[in-house]
Image (spheres, rainbow, N blue to C red):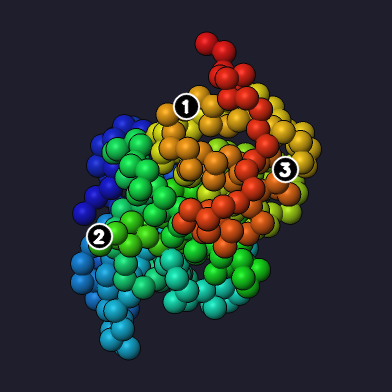
Amino acid sequence: MSAHCPKCKKPVPEGALQCTHCDALLPSEVLAGPTSRPGVGGKWDVLAALEPLGSQKVYRVRNRTTDDEVALRMLPLSLGGEEAAQERIRNLLQRSKDLVGAPGILAVVGYEVEDRTPYFITEVFSGPSLQDRLKKEKALPVDLVRRIGLAAATALAAAHKISFFHGELRPGCIVLGPEGEVRVTDFGVGKVVSEVTAKAAAGGGGLGPAKPGFYRAPELARNDIPDARSDLYALGCILFEALTGDRRLPDPYREACAAPRPGAPFPDPTAAHPLMDSSMREVIRRLLAPAPADRFESAAAVMAALKGEPFPRASVVSPGAMLPPE
């Protein structure tokens, strides 16, 4: 088996640290599988390769001692050498154990490092991530996006009920099953993996806060403490991208996010897409309110809105005034 160098795209041995063709140092995209690492393969019988999640390979396996069947998701090899990050992951999994079996959640039930190879243990659930789906289709039908949003909001509601926040919600964390099921994974731990991956790609250095990105709530760029409303903002970004195939928000809206005022009208983040379904537009507008206090009060309220129940509309300025300059 082989992986591919992300720079020259040529095949390289799994677990390699440097490309044998272009000499590039290989980041976390080049991952080991359980059959290529003796310490891992000695504990598990690999039954099948499942749908990968992005660059992370997933296998259905059987524990040789307990005979339990689970899924292993192979993580960046760089994570295996990060003791502090590993301790954070184990603490998060201990705190999130009540999420196992919760509706809409594909829970990570274990984390191990065998033969320097880190991996998550989850229940067996196979399907592409929403990120993978969007790479192929760009924009999705409104009914599918509504269903994805409802499932994600259901998962967030279960987590927020025990004061556990996702912290890194994005399309790569949403898994689409073969029968239309939707699950959200990597509660808490996804942020740690992202930080380690970013550190490895940058050539080392201490772990710091993640750089602001499309799914990152404005208050987190100001180093505010993340909470449930930060997850809801990320959900709004995901629904916006899934409907439009776009990850660009108008400049006036982004400027308003830099200094939000609770209760104040804000530029319409959906203005560049006038054909967007009107009911989804209202949900997204409220999810993307720059001030956390102006978003939905809870994930349960998002669920109700996606089911068509009435809710307070976001206070936005005229869409016609919001089209970005050409």
Q: Residue at x 66, y 68 (%)?
A: 163
Residue type beneath disc 3: Ala
Residue matched to label 3:
291
In the rendered image, residue 145, in percent from the top left (x then y), is placed at 39, 47
Tell which of 213 and 111 is nearer to you: 213
Residue 151 horizontal side relative to residue 42, left or right:
right
In what element is the residue under mark 2?
Answer: loop
Which circle, 2 or 3, is nearer the viewer? 3
Using the image, determine if residue 304 lies above or below residue 203: below
In the rendered image, residue 304, in percent from the top left (x then y), is placed at 53, 59
Using the image, determine if residue 154 lies above or below residue 241: below
In the rendered image, residue 182, in percent from the top left (x then y), is placed at 37, 60
Residue matched to label 1:
274
Using the image, determine if residue 245 lies above or below residue 50: above
Residue 319: quarter of image? top right
**Total number of numbered discs in the rendering:** 3
In the rendered image, residue 113, in percent from the top left (x then y), is placed at 45, 69
Residue type beneath disc 2: Pro
Q: State the CA–CA distance, disc 1 to disc 2.
A: 32 Å
In what element is the residue under mark 3?
Answer: loop
Residue 224 horizontal side relative to residue 171, left or right:
right
Residue matched to label 2:
178
Q: Quadrant of the N terminus?
A: bottom left
Q: Earlier in the sequence, mark 1 or mark 2?
A: 2
Q: Earlier in the sequence, mark 2 or mark 3?
A: 2
